[in-house]
Image (cartoon, rainbow, N blue to C red):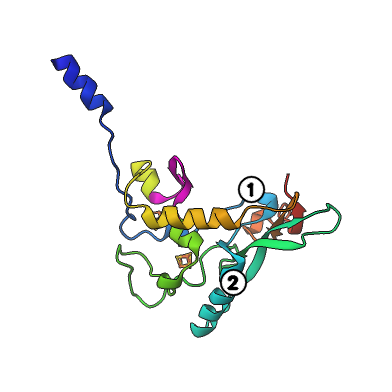
Amino acid sequence: MLIRKRFLSNNIKKYVKFQCITDCSQCCIEREYYPSKKFGKIGVLILPEEKERIERLANENRLKIKILPRIGISKMKDSGPTKILAYQLMGSESNGNTCPFLDVDSGNKSPHGGFPCKIYKERPLACIAYPLIESEPITLDQKCKFCKEHGNADQNLNSEVESLLKIKEKMIPDMPVIWRFATGVGELEDKEIIESGWIIDK
Ligand code: SF4
Ligand code: SF4
């Protein structure tokens, strides 16, 4: 009986509910080099159909933003991209960090105690999807503070899954050559390595 109980408890799936860590705003502040330092720090992924809306929201909030291309595609290698699949909203600091929509000055707090997003209800799909990076199986970005403290989660992720699937659907390349835009942005000590402009993705 004892053996059977142990067998059952070892096989009961533990559901872990995702929720942001109290006071955390890390994912709206820290930007990473991707896929390597050469490409500079990336911004928040913006789909082409989101770009105009984000620019309008910046105007309404009297914010200066910089949106660069992120992924492009083309038929030929020598032409540069002929279609842009995604843009990116760059951070407001010179090292590429801190989303311009993050309200760090007003003293207001988000429901979990972090800095609030000025466009929370209309934030980009990439922000809604985060920290989900794969939906089957559900995989969270290990850089997210929740993951660092609790590991993976598999509950309370419906809107994240939905948003990630929408992004994936829009990001299917219908031309053979894929280009990635090097942002030219990063830490001062990395300036020599960081490039700027379109580079063919290997
Ligand atoms: S998604 Fe993760 S990193 Fe972002 S605020 Fe929530 S806990 Fe922090
Ligand atoms: S748009 Fe809002 S949720 Fe997205 S990174 Fe900026 S502050 Fe964070």
Q: Quadrant of residue 115?
A: bottom left
Q: Residue at x 66, y 50 (%)?
A: 37
Q: Quadrant of ligand 1?
A: bottom left
Percent from the top left, x then y, of residue 106? 38, 78
Q: Disc 1 to disc 2, how far (Cα)?
A: 23 Å
Residue 185 as seen in the image, left or right of residue 197: left
Percent from the top left, x then y, of residue 102? 45, 70
Residue 201 appears in view: yes
Amino acid type of the residue tagged 1 in the rendering:
Pro
Q: Compare marks 1 and 2 and give the one earlier in the sequence.
A: 1
Q: Which residue is mark 1?
A: 35
The magenta stretch spans residue 163: no
The single residue placed furthest to the right in the displayed view is 78
Circle 1 SS class: loop
How many marks can you see?
A: 2
Amino acid type of the residue tagged 2 in the rendering:
Lys
Circle 2 SS class: helix
Residue 31 appears in view: no
Q: Residue at x 65, y 59 (%)?
A: 188
Q: Residue at x 62, y 51 (%)?
A: 34
- The magenta-colored residue range is 130-145
Residue 135 as seen in the image, left or right of residue 24: right
> Eyeballing the image, is 15 above or below 34?
above
Percent from the top left, x then y, of residue 120? 41, 70
The disc placed on residue 27 is none
Q: Quadrant of residue 89?
A: bottom right
Q: Which residue is mark 2?
A: 51
Residue 146 as seen in the image, left or right of residue 126: left
Give the position of the N terminus as an image quadrant: top left
